Amino acid sequence: MLGRTANGLFWMYRYLERAENTSRLVETGQRIALTRLGSTDDQWRPVLESAGVAAGYDVAHETLSKDSAIDWMLRASDNTSSVMSSIGAARHNARQVRTALTEDVWEAINGAYMETRGMLARKVVERDLPKVLGTIRQRAALVRGATHGTMLRNDIYDFARIGTFLERADNTARILDVKYYVLLPSVLSVGTSLDNVQWETILQSVSARGGFQMEYGNSAGPRDIARFLILDRRMPRSLAFCVGKIVSNLGYLVTDYGERSAAADKADALAGAFASKSIDDIFDQGLHEFLQEVLAQLAALGHQIEIDYRFYE
Amino acid sequence: MGTDDVFDEMWGRSGGLRSPYEVFSAWFDGEDPRRLRLKQREAEDLFRLMGITFNVYGRDEAEERLIPFDIVPRIISGREWRRLSRGIEQRVRAINQFLYDIYHRQEIIRAGRIPAEMISRNSAFLPQMCGVSPPGGVYTHIVGIDLVRTGEDQFYVLEDNARTPSGVSYMLENRETMLHMFPELFSGNRVQPVQNYPGDLRRSLAASLPPATSGSPRVAVLTPGLYNSAYFEHAFLADQMGVELVEGHDLQVVDGRVAMRTTRGYQPIDVLYRRVDDEFLDPLNFNPDSQLGVPGIMDVYRAGGITIANAPGTGIADDKAIYSYMPEIVEFYTGERPLLENVPTWRCSEPDSLAYVIDNLADLVVKEVHGSGGYGMLIGPTSTKQERASFTRKLRARPDNYIAQPTLSLSTVPIFTRSGLAPRHVDLRPFVLVSPEGVKITSGGLTRVALKKGSLVVNSSQGGGTKDTWVLED
């Protein structure tokens, strides 16, 4: 496979994952705004931060408002991580690697792009927001499903998966890091409704509320949330799960190509850290410090993959 | 429906249904126009979803447009097709022999059949190709011969596309779309398949392997990239053949071979189906500013390290001034009379011809020698006085840049409109593959249709559409 093709696949799936994550964050923000009395526009700041788009927002806007935050995350063309920009970039990469994709996958991503572009041609009115967000998620799921159901399990698939899980791990780590302070033990805020809103935000941002309740019930505390999202290998958006998938797919490439890669070593080291640590170890080390380290390691891993598999000249 | 001076391929000149259209006509009469209108829209949605689009030059990068598709097939009988095929094969063989000769001993010039300056002063002539012998003597692996029809038995070659003919993806996708929408039509007609084209193309390219190949030949398609107007076709063909689609920056010369950068290091390519023009192919040998090519590929080529399809320098065979010599060229190399006719052509470089052309501008079509896509031409009968005046100035300034032809009364085929079937002018581009193993012509081709009533311009860049083209089994 061409190095450029591996690069295109990797980014196509990263951007697809990003579009889905961003739309989920918008949904979370909107839900909190609607279900919490006394919520204000300020509550959109952590949402923007979780999506990693707050700095760009501040450059483009003087004040923070719900409408402009939603618009920034969904439609803004000068926000490279907006849903529209991400789906556009995913499709651009898909065109670039068209020969590596099955017809089903190409049509799914092209269809996602065409429908999203139609829905997001104008500002989304509040009444339409649930439907728009639902459609984006369904469209992304369709691409994933077509990928899962029609693509050969070869190096093409491996790069698609590696891109997906690197983006997802990055996303989960960032959401946790923006909110890490609400998960820390604190005499003042334990059990207050503020905490609960914050916890709920975290869980909803990664579609984990239902799963978490099933596992931990209603009485669980913040440390359980952290454990669930960092170490639980059953949870498909936890850091341990995502890193485990990256290790597997890099491992398939190693077997396939008959050559050990530096990236595979880096991924193994990262996975080792999750296997050996308990949530108490992580809190002892410092949650924020731990997450910062993970984010840096994920970035380094992405860079190593680019080098090992000759993405660029 | 046909009028006296225009030959309609469904209704002839007199309005009597021609036999290849019998089954179609009976089917059409039994259809509800509203259902057909829905089908027409369905076809467009299908094309958009499949991404069968082209980019328009000089417009917003993001703009991808559909070529309009008409649901009425263009139908050719097996007998008509066999006759055309013989003529096409003869012409394509002659073109390859001509190219070999031009880049070697130039016997045709020595024999006085073509003036030497037609070659030496022609910008499509590549001195870098002199003395180079491509595998099997094949220069044009992929050729598109544009044909027009003016009557029951009158076909003319309008032009030869010997550089990088495009449109074959539309031939294939138009058929897929028709099969998808109107399966019953194919049950009632015995239509020869076109789907073997990608397989034939791959075999044909692989058969043109260079001396340096070891093992089974590795084929790749070279595209200028995503923003090229035919990018969809490049990706489509690579995909259908199951070969890599590469760009210039994926390639470099490694150990005397042209190699592509893969996830596992550099791997040599044996046959490169390039969709990049000569000029951009090699910045070391041609245009030094080119970002699209591969530095040094010409040196590898000359040393037998790679096959470039089509060979560099083939443009000398399809330039419109050379076109006017095609009857002589066919006779010179095959010793036979040409089976396909040329459109009578005035070479404006000749003073008598230039005078005639300027005097009769209102009745002629004037084309640039190197033009394509319907740009830079004058269609006399529909031109304004000002346009003719401005063209007269251009002709006097650079006479050797132009040729002129009579306006032919192109045949029509019906298209489906709001008010039913309506005749529109068409042309036909059959696709021909040439390899050391022989010549292969796909039974069908791309029919382009001028959607505007009365218009003779079928180019997609100028409002033309396409049709599925059927060749029937007799």
Image (cartoon, coloured by chain):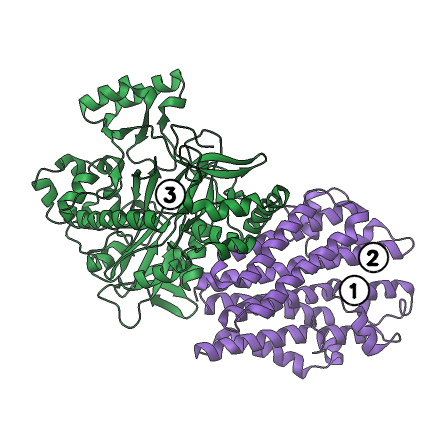
Which hue is chain A drawn in? purple
Task: Name which residue lies at 54% across and 39% down.
Answer: B416
Q: Give the residue type at disc 2.
A: Arg
Of the pair A21 and B427, the residue shown nearer to us:
B427
Name the element at disc 2.
helix
Name the element at disc 3.
strand
Q: Residue A193: percent from the left, percent from the top?
A: 91, 64
Q: Quadrant of residue A12?
A: bottom right
Q: Residue B436: percent from the left, percent from the top?
A: 23, 60
Tell me if residue A87 comes above or below residue B74 in the rendering.
below
Q: Residue beneath label 1, please?
A: A204
Q: Give the residue type at disc 1.
A: Gln
Whether residue B164 can be seen here: no
Q: Residue beneath label 2, please?
A: A31
Of the pair B27 and B258, the residue shown nearer to us:
B27
Q: Give the residue type at disc 3.
A: Leu
- Cα gap from disc 3 to disc 2, whole angstroms: 59 Å
B471 sits left or right of A89 in the view = left
Q: Residue beneath label 3, please?
A: B428
